[in-house]
Amino acid sequence: MWQATDSAVWQGRDDSRESPEALRVFQTVQQHSAWPTTLGKGDIALIGFASDTGVQRNQGRIGAAEAPPVLRRALANMAHHPAAFALHDAGDFVYADSQLEQGQQALAAAVCQIQQAGARTLVLGGGHETAFAHGQGLFDAHPNQHISIINFDPHLDLRRAPHATSGTPFAQLAALAQSQGRAFDYTCIGASRAANTAALLHDAAALGVDIVWDTEVHWANAAALAEKLQQKCAAADAVYLTIDLDVLPAAQMPAVSAPAALGIPLDLLLYLIRPILHSGKTLAADAVEYSPPYDREQQGARSAARLLWQIWQDWR
């Protein structure tokens, strides 16, 4: 079920008396009381997917279904600066636990519609099951394009399961790509050997997944990694950037199902996503797995909101 965002979510400090330019995100985001049908080039649709059924099915800690409004509140009070794209709040998709697949198909259809109109999509999870729906919508909207998936995540999320979970989205997208006769171009940055079994590594090798291990992601190697990502984008027609927030160290992101013992620090993550967002190829992005019940003094929400704000600012 789609529902509009409660306008009370978008609140913050009002400094507009100081200057017409003293604005914050809550004062500039464009809210919609009905599903937006007029978005086009120059617009970003911010969409929530309030689901953690996939996390539960993957034996994780639930809570990510509560994330979209909490992340909006954390983003609301950040300073507004001119950006290449206008930010539109396109509401949330909310489904009961037994309706995950129905919800995924609804989100995929919505993403496809927005993408075909020329706008871009920024999705707030929810668990990483969000990625199958987001990716499917992108595939459907651009059937003849080579789409590169770049995932920042300790987990490859290539699990085999009889139904969708937060651990299966890229296995599902690989199967979808094969059924559509298109290449499956998947890069996982920050993957942890400690968090992925030998079976998953075998499947990744069979699919040609490009893996950059968490032990390789550090400032001494940052320039080379940024160049690698720039080349990835240049070789693609379109890019889908997906960020599992458990890629951040547990100290910066405690509020996830599986906090990272190592992870990629937020400042380095912001540096690495910049060439992706500046490529002109990125049509879709999401941030998933934030789980408010496990947050500490909104530390995780603040980290996630800073990331979302930077995605919006850097997107070209």
Image (cartoon, rainbow, N blue to C red):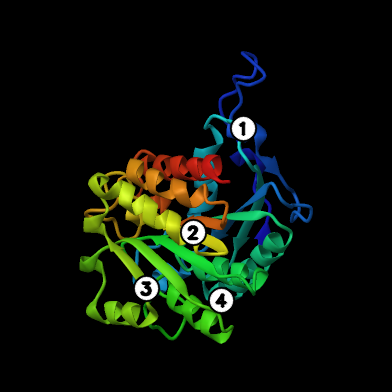
Crowding near the residue tagged with mark 1, few <14, some 14–19, many ≥20 C-alpha atoms within 10 Å:
few
Seen at 35% across and 69% down, the residue is 210
CA gap, disc 2 to disc 3? Answer: 15 Å
Residue 243 x/y as whole percent: 43, 56
Q: Depth-wise, is mark 1 or mark 3 nearer the camera?
A: 3
Q: Quadrant of the N terminus?
A: bottom right
Name the N-terminal-most of marks 3 and 4.
4
Element type at mark 3: loop
Q: Are marks 1 and 2 in contact (CB under 8 Å)?
A: no
Which residue matches tag 3? 209
Q: Depth-wise, is mark 2 or mark 3 nearer the camera?
A: 2
Name the N-terminal-most of marks 4 and 2.
4
On residue 298, the disc is none
Q: Depth-wise, is mark 1 or mark 2 nearer the camera?
A: 2
Which residue matches tag 1? 82
Q: Relative to the observer, which residue lies in front, 40 or 168?
A: 40
Under mark 2, the amino acid is Cys
Under mark 1, the amino acid is Pro
Residue 277 x/y as whole percent: 51, 49
Which residue matches tag 4? 101
CA gap, disc 1 to disc 4? Answer: 38 Å
